[in-house]
Image (spheres, grey):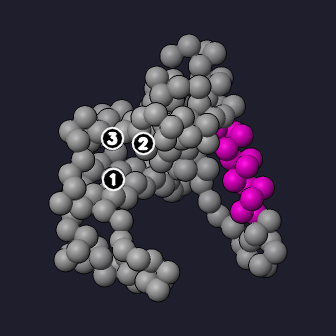
Amino acid sequence: MGKEATSACLAGQAALAARLLKRISSEAAAAGNNLVFSPLSIHVALALMSTAAAGDTLDEILRVAGAPSLEELAPFVRDTVVDGVLADQSGIGGPSISFACGTWTDKKCPLRPAYVDAVVGTFKGNSWAVDFQNEVTTNYMKSCLDMHECRSISTNSIASSNFFL
């Protein structure tokens, strides 16, 4: 990946972080709440979604992520973020970072093998097929969501998070 593409993706990532911070910090401050969020995790989740998107959806994801193209976003996230920023640096006195990245999909709607390969290979994540209707996952999701506001539980979920130890 060239310097120009890396710079463009990095600038897009910083712009996304600034937009998110401006939006959600004012809401948290107005409510008198503290705020913790990871723009990096959100950027990785957008990159995960972009690998299966096309057309207008892909264009919108790239716009939000601040990336020039899918061909530049995926290598940037893999090489710069996952293998660089999020790499375990405890051996040289730096932080040990646990990075959780993955997809959960209902067994009734399996992901395309190429997408699973991208999640596991490109983003070093995991992919699980679960029974959202009958397994414990549904009960857990119901405990986290206000079911009066939700008509149904999604059959697909993408997650990305990081923890500094």
Whether label 3 touches label 2, CB < 8 Å: yes
In this view, 156 is above or below 47: below
Q: Which residues are magenta?
A: 13-25
* Disc 1 from disc 2: Cα separation: 9 Å
Give left or right: position of 85 versus 143.
right
Q: At 36% from the left edge and 33% from the top edge, which residue is drawn? A: 122
Could you tell me if the residues under marks 1 and 2 are in contact, i.e. CB atoms within 8 Å?
yes
| Residue ID for mark 2 | 48
Sequence-first tag of 1 and 2 = 2
Up-down relation of residue 137 to residue 113 (above or below): below
Residue depicted at x 41% and y 38%: 53
Question: In which quadrant of the rendered view does residue 36 lie?
Answer: bottom right
- Counting from the top left corner in percent of width and height, residue 124 is at 35, 39
Residue corresponding to mark 3: 119
Which residue is denoted by mark 1 in the rendering?
103
Q: Residue 10 falls in which quadrant of the image?
A: top right
Numbered tag placed on residue 47 in the rendering: none
Q: CA distance from mark 3 to mark 2?
A: 7 Å
Q: Is residue 36 left or right of residue 103?
A: right
Q: Is residue 23 magenta?
A: yes
Name the residue at the front extreme: 56
Can the viewer see residue 28 in this picture? yes
- At x 56% / y 13%, what residue is drawn? 2
Q: Position of residue 101 (x, y in %)?
A: 39, 50
Q: Amino acid at mark 2?
A: Leu
